[in-house]
Amino acid sequence: MARVGVFVCHCGENIARTVDVAKVAEFARTVPGVVLSDHYTYFCSAPGQKKVQEAIQQQSLTGVVVAACSPHLHEPTFRGASSQAGLNPFLCEMANIREQCSWVHAKGEAATNKACAIVASMVEKVKRSHPLRPIEVPLTKRALVIGGGVAGIRAALDIANAGYPVTLVERQPTIGGNMARLSETFPTLDCSQCILTPLMVEASRHPKIELLTYAEVQEVNGYVGNFKVRIKKKPRYVREELCTGCDDCVPVCPVSLPNEFDMNLSWRKAIYLPFPQAVPAVYTLDASQCVNSTLESKSGYRVLACERCSQACGPKAIDYDMEPEILEREVGAVVVASGYNLMQAEEAREYGYGKHPDVLDGFEFERLLSASGPTGGEVRRPSDGKVPKEVVFIQCVGSRDPQRGVPYCSRVCCMYTAKHALLFKHKVPDGKAYVFYMDIRAAGKGYEEFVNRVMEEERVLYLRGRVSRVVSEDGKLLVYGTDTLAGQPVRMRADLVVLATAMVPSSDGELARKLRVPTDAYGFFQEVHPKLRPVETLTAGVFLAGSAQSPKDIPDTVAHASAAGSKALELFSKPVLHREPIIAQVNEGACNGCFDCERVCPYRAMERKEIRDRQGNLIRLVARVNEAMCEGCGLCTAACRSRSIDLFGFSEEQIFAQLAAVAPAPIEAQACLA
Ligand SMILES: Cc1cc2nc3c(=O)[nH]c(=O)nc-3n(C[C@H](O)[C@H](O)[C@H](O)COP(=O)(O)OP(=O)(O)OC[C@H]3O[C@@H](n4cnc5c(N)ncnc54)[C@H](O)[C@@H]3O)c2cc1C
């Protein structure tokens, strides 16, 4: 005989303002199987949980329904409380009468009726629930970190410093990411490379970190604690173990190419080191750009080598026969730190980017400011090499602009524009800097003070308003805009225009697909909960670090990365993993072996089991669930035509009983409310 207790929570006023909680509790008592019901301001509070526990023990309850908020929030709270009181936690269910009722309806009978229906339906479910035990899964205590920007480096170091091995995969020939490109960093104006390179070196020398640069993750299989990863290491045509970084190969190389690290504002050779402090300090031969075809590798890569670099190389590190290498690693946790890109400034055509060489984006200006940049840190116009005297900075190019860019704020542009204006004034003291802005967003430690310093002490003129277009005239740029505070159109001459373009995800979605992690509407990796679980993803064991999740400055990136690292460590702190037993089960006797379930399962959790007779002869194949891989999504249950698959905790019997309960409940509820 079922003995169910129903506990209706007011959630302060969140539920009680709209739903008549006393009437819901009264109604619950009329549902067959319910022996007790109660309502209380906050059942999630310590006294509230105590009430539930006392009821379980005093009334010998066989099931509990807490009518409150979403199970995402407090299911673990109430299942934990039930378990402590001696009830199997899977016999406790949440009836969500907040998000699915009080928050979406106006106060009145209809909202109360709906709450009654939800409660009745959950009572029917819990009456048909069975005690379940968590599944134990072994665990590989090694992490994979994807992306070697400051986020990936920080997460890798945190995990490795705690004693666990890490494989850090970076697709570029060096780690460092976008931070390596920056000149100085707001608000403290530390030299970016000076604070980053010690971390890069530490990561490369760490005995627990395996650094794989010029590499990309090809395939990820498995599940939390037990991922199997295939990594493709692209051929550098330079043996890492032999290259001494002496640079002898570079002067002899006859091919000059635009240098991507310097945003194409300088030149590099076909064999190159991306920047002097690159880690590893190993050269890379850009095979697609090499001259004088002599070789064709087995992999289909065409290496067009003149062999001058090879002849100049003392340690004989150059190897034109190098092939892509496929590496396989088993890891328990994955940290995604794939970072961001800048929106293509060409998309804001009215600002003349791509048409006028003196219209730059933020990274290009960073390289001009940088001591290791193409001009040695002197600000010079790309068009004629002259020192610009008047620079116009335009904020929110593509950000907060759903028509031509993205609706979100990129969060760092107000600050780096202030930094750009300040550094320009330091380098060109008689220069003039103007900033067009929509609002100033300077929420960070020392940020507001920094912007004020730029406006007041550095005398940078801030103009509130939009720029409508930038055109060139007589070797100068003409900027047309509006000063919305003065209520006047503005037309000013400039030597250089710098656009603060939107930050967008670096990944095109391919990585998210491989990891089976959802992305948000803009392509950034989606966290489980923006406030309470900002580094976890819906795929257990995959965590997010830095600007791969949303635009972030360096302090926020580093904090987020350390949080991701600590989530991986939390996982590794357990001897084995306990997984929720909400998984599919196959009735082998009824299974007809069509394997539709195998086809629809996104987690590759359906296996084929051989049924043999006593003599060992194969009779038939049936489906079997790999308990460690099943995520309990229920797709196989829906696809199974012989109805031989069911889901623990969501059985067909439970779902039909719930549906049946929903229809008559409002009518019964009407009676109770009358
Ligand atoms: C113009 C400009 C100026 C800025 N100035 C400042 C400043 O002064 N102060 C400040 O606090 N912040 C500043 N920022 C923000 C700062 O750049 C970011 O906070 C920081 O770089 C974020 O680091 P990240 O590691 O998350 O991402 P990234 O730096 O983008 O690193 C991501 C890394 O992942 C790699 N990667 C991507 N996809 C893959 C893949 N599939 N496989 C393997 N590797 C992959 C990339 O190659 C890259 O190395 C500025 C930003 C801009 C645009």
Image (cartoon, rainbow, N blue to C red):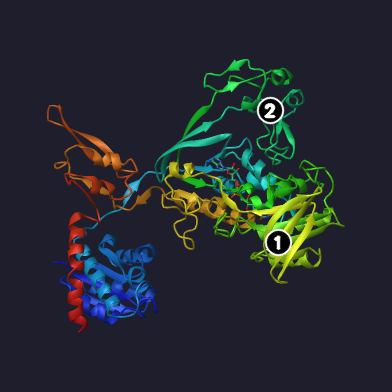
Q: Nearer the viewer, residue 303 or 394?
A: 394
Q: Sort mark 1 into few (<14), some (14-19) or many (20+) by Cα contacts within 10 Å.
A: many
Amino acid type at circle 2 is Ala
Quarter placement of the C terminus: bottom left
**Position of 116 compared to 441: left or right?**
left
Quick one: which residue is furthest to the front in this view?
A: 473
Identify which residue is drawn at 54% across, 31% down: 233
Mark 2 or mark 1: which is in front?
Answer: 1
Q: Relative to 286, does residue 166 appear above or below in the rendering?
A: below
Residue 73 locus on image (x, y percent): 39, 65
Mark 2 CB in 8 Å range of ligand 1? Answer: no
Q: Nearer the viewer, residue 560 or 602?
A: 602
Secondary structure beneath disc 1? strand
Quarter placement of the N terminus: bottom left
Q: Sort mark 2 into few (<14), some (14-19) or many (20+) by Cα contacts within 10 Å.
A: many
Q: Relative to 448, does residue 341 appear above or below in the rendering?
A: above
Q: Relative to 353, does residue 116 appear above or below in the rendering?
A: below
Q: Would you identify the image quadrant in which residue 491 lies?
A: bottom right
Mark 1 CB in 8 Å range of ligand 1? Answer: no
Q: Relative to 299, does residue 357 appear above or below in the rendering?
A: below
Residue 164 locus on image (x, y percent): 52, 44
**Position of 3 compared to 634: left or right?**
left
Q: Which residue is mark 1?
A: 481
Identify which residue is drawn at 70% across, 28% down: 244
Q: Nearer the viewer, residue 31 or 670?
A: 670
On residue 526, the disc is: none
For the question of whether residue 29 can be seen, the reply is no
Q: CA distance from mark 2 to mark 1?
A: 43 Å
Amino acid type at circle 1 is Gly
**Position of 416 compared to 616: left or right?**
right
Q: Which residue is mark 2?
A: 270
Residue 437 locus on image (x, y percent): 68, 63
